[in-house]
Image: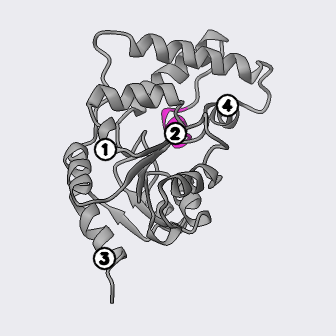
Amino acid sequence: LVVFDCDGTLIDSGHNIVTAMCEAWRRYDLEPPPANDIRRIVGLKLDEAICKLMPPDCDIDSDKLVDAYIEAFSRFRDQPDYVEPLYPGIAECLNDLSKAGFQLGVATGKSRRGLARTLGQHGIEKHFSVLKTADDGPGKPNPDILLDAIAETGAAAETTAMIGDTIYDMIMAKDASAAAIGVDWGYHEAEELKDAGARTILNNCSELYPALQNLWRTP
């Protein structure tokens, strides 16, 4: 079983997330967080991400900022020029892994509705046998959604790999006794991923299949 994170791993959504978050802050006359701070919380459940970004002295209820973010992001997403591209090589990678017989899944902090829309937009939903979202349990790095994915597919932790771009993905994988594989094209640095438990770091999608073969090679 190979489970992918979504934002920052499958798709490059950072710019849209930053733009929507800044608009949510400005709606309540708050100074928006630095763009890099916003990118670093991608992968967490939205309510937790908002709380991490709020200044200590903020007197605005976090639920209002959550609602403002959702409204802004939804409005941007419905615009004709909205772009949320797959990272280079992702479509080919998923196709190759599916043909090779791997079960594929997604574990993300996105909502189920948001994930379905993203996968459908790119025509890649057919590759995944299990989808776990913010609607299905505690957010990352809690391992519950990954453990549920393993159970639902009949896989085993020792033959499951979690592919992600943040320390939250790596910690989740480690706590689920799965293999953690980091990617260097997302929102956290490679050294951070290694420190959080990544067994290897991918520089591009073509390295994933060989990494999986090496991971599970029978002596």
Q: Are marks 4 and 2 in contact (CB under 8 Å)?
A: no
Whole-angstrom CA distance, mark 4 to mark 3, is: 38 Å
Whole-angstrom CA distance, mark 2 to mark 1, is: 23 Å
Q: Nearer the viewer, mark 2 or mark 1?
A: 1
Instruction: Say few, some or many: other residues with alpha carbon within 10 Å of mark 3 (under 14 / 14 to 19 / 20 or more).
Output: few
- Tell which residue pokes out farthest to the bottom in this image: 219
Q: Which mark is residue 127?
A: 1
Name the residue carrying label 3.
214
The earlier-in-sequence mark between 3 and 1 is: 1
Instruction: Say few, some or many: other residues with alpha carbon within 10 Å of mark 4 (under 14 / 14 to 19 / 20 or more).
Output: some
* Element under disc 3: helix
The earlier-in-sequence mark between 1 and 4 is: 4
* Element under disc 4: helix
Q: Which mark is residue 42?
A: 2
Q: Which quadrant of the view contains residue 26?
A: top right
Look at label 3 and name its amino acid: Asn
Q: Is residue 35 magenta?
A: yes
Q: Nearer the viewer, residue 209 or 193?
A: 209
Q: Is residue 202 above or below residue 123?
A: below
Q: Nearer the viewer, mark 1 or mark 4?
A: 1
Q: Which residues are magenta?
A: 34-42
Instruction: Say few, some or many: other residues with alpha carbon within 10 Å of mark 1 (under 14 / 14 to 19 / 20 or more).
Output: some
Q: Nearer the viewer, mark 4 or mark 3?
A: 3
Instruction: Say few, some or many: other residues with alpha carbon within 10 Å of mark 2 (under 14 / 14 to 19 / 20 or more).
Output: many
- Residue at the image point whose x is 55% and y is 57% from the top: 151
Q: Are marks 2 and 1 in contact (CB under 8 Å)?
A: no
Left or right, residue 197 beside residue 103:
right
Q: How is the image coloured?
A: one colour
